[in-house]
């Protein structure tokens, strides 16, 4: 189960990074970016759920737990907002959306990296 959790979390990183950075480089939100955001969220949720099961289904109010919850909530909001922007078909919002994406991606990296570091070292913060 741990192997699948690691694969899912890293797949989330891959999809989310591709979505965020391609949107930034293309300078306009497109339909495929939104699909990739939702896919990243799906894999992150699957990986987080499996990691939780490996840890014994115990949520800990520590640095990693709090930033992890915040990251998933932000990813959900980000994906929903991207969907709304596309449905509204507002060109100004499509052109400015990448600024929000980068912030969410950076925040998402915090629990990704802390999980990797704390998981490998056994250190708890």
Image (tube, rainbow, N blue to C red):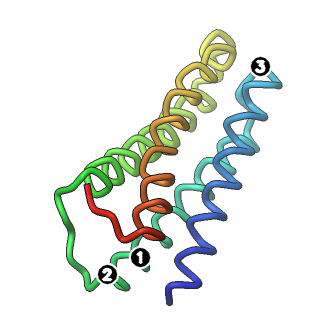
The alpha-carbon separation of the residues under discs 2 and 3 comes to 40 Å
| Residue 67 placement (x, y as % from top left) | 33, 47
* Contact, mark 1 vs mark 3 (Cβ under 8 Å): no
Q: Residue furthest right?
A: 26
Question: Disc 1 marks which residue?
Answer: 51
The image quarter in which residue 9 lies = bottom right
CA distance separating discs 1 and 3: 35 Å
* Residue that numbered label 3 is attached to: 27
Height in image: 70 above or below 106? Answer: below
Q: Residues within 10 Å of mark 1 (few under 14, many from 20)?
A: many
Across and down, in percent, residue 107 comes to: 45, 37
The disc label shown at residue 55, or none: 2
Please tell me the numbered disc located at residue 35: none
Mark 2: give few (<14), some (14-19) or many (20+) Cα within 10 Å: few
- Dot 2 falls on a residue whose secondary structure is loop
Which quarter of the rendering shows the C terminus? bottom left
> Which is more toward the observer, 125 or 2?
125
**Horizontal and vertical percent position of residue 99:** 58, 19
Residue under the image location 77 percent in, 19 percent down: 27
Residues at badges 1 and 2 in contact (C-beta under 8 Å)? yes
Q: Quadrant of residue 7?
A: bottom right
Q: CA distance from mark 1 to mark 2?
A: 6 Å
Looking at the image, which residue is at 65% across and 43% down? 34
5 horizontally vs 18: left or right: left
Q: Position of residue 42 (x, y in %)?
A: 54, 63
Comparing marks 1 and 3, which lies closer to the viewer?
Answer: 1
Secondary structure of the residue carrying tag 3 is loop
Query: What residue sits 39% from the left and 74% below the top?
Result: 49
Q: Give the mark nearest the N terminus, 1 or 3.
A: 3
């Amino acid at each position: 189960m741990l192997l699948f959790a690691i694969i899912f979390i890293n797949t989330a990183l891959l999809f989310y990074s591709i979505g965020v950075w391609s949107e930034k480089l293309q300078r306009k939100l497109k339909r495929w970016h939104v699909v990739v955001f939702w896919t990243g969220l799906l894999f992150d949720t699957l990986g987080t759920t499996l990691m939780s099961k490996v840890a014994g289904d115990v949520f800990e109010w520590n640095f990693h737990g709090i930033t992890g919850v915040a990251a998933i909530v932000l990813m959900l909001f980000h994906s929903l907002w991207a969907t709304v922007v596309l449905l509204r078909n507002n060109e100004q919002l499509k052109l400015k959306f990448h600024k929000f994406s980068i912030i969410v991606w950076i925040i998402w990296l915090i629990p990704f990296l802390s999980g990797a570091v704390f998981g490998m070292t056994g250190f708890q913060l």
